[in-house]
Image: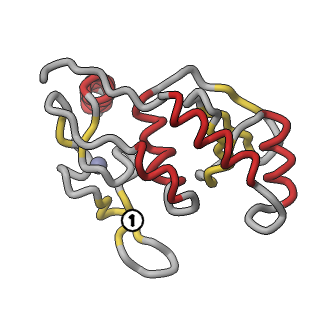
Amino acid sequence: MEGEEIKIVTPKFQKTVEDLIKNLSSENGASWEIELARKFNALPTGQELWSFILLTPNGEIIDQDFDGNIQHYPFDLQALIRVLVGGSKRYPQLVQFIPSRPDDSKTCPVCEGSGIWEQSKDISTGRPAKCFICAGLGWLNEDYWKVFTEIQKELKNHK
Ligand SMILES: [Zn+2]
């Protein structure tokens, strides 16, 4: 089905994320996480290199860098998928919203579909880490793939 849109943010998604935010307590979250979650009505899903990531019930991503600066991002499907994949380890309820690979998706050019980024190693296990471009899915949606291949071309031209 060509061009079929991936719809992740359904009423069920919103309810699931809202419930996860509500259920966040000192038993499953740090106090600063709970504080951020209440302040922004968003679910803390993890940490990236320079920031903490939060997911809103509308599928938007907020991050707070370690200096406390907040950034709201406009809706971005691939970013949402990344956050879902990353956050599903902590919140298994999110797994159901990770889309299966659509027909018009493209194989990830960084990991070539393996989902593994060979250049990076997990410090604790010594194993290669998940590809950070596709979040270990091995594929990208078409729009993101276009943007990414443009960036790659640019980089090559500047060499
Ligand atoms: Zn990849």
In the rendered image, residue 78, in percent from the top left (x then y), is placed at 40, 34
In the rendered image, residue 36, in percent from the top left (x then y), is placed at 81, 43
- Answer left or right for 34 relative to 77: right
- Answer left or right for 36 relative to 101: right
Residue at 76%, 32% (x, y): give it: 70
Residue at 24%, 26% (x, y): give it: 142
Asked whether residue 51 appears in the rendered view, the answer is no
Q: Is residue 16 above or below residue 74?
A: below
In the rendered image, residue 96, in percent from the top left (x then y), is placed at 41, 48
The N terminus appears in which quarter of the rendering?
top left
90 or 150: nearer the eye? 90
62 or 120: nearer the eye? 62
67 or 142: nearer the eye? 142
Q: In this view, does 35 lie above or below 42?
A: below
- Residue 114 occupies quadrant: bottom left
Asked whether residue 149 appears in the rendered view, the answer is yes
Residue furthest out toward the bottom: 125
Mark 1 secondary-structure assignment: strand
Residue at 38%, 50% (x, y): give it: 135
The C terminus appears in which quarter of the rendering?
top left
Name the amino acid, label 1: Ala
Q: Which residue is under mark 1?
A: 129
In the rendered image, residue 150, in percent from the top left (x then y), is placed at 28, 23
Marker count (numbered): 1
157 or 88: nearer the eye? 88
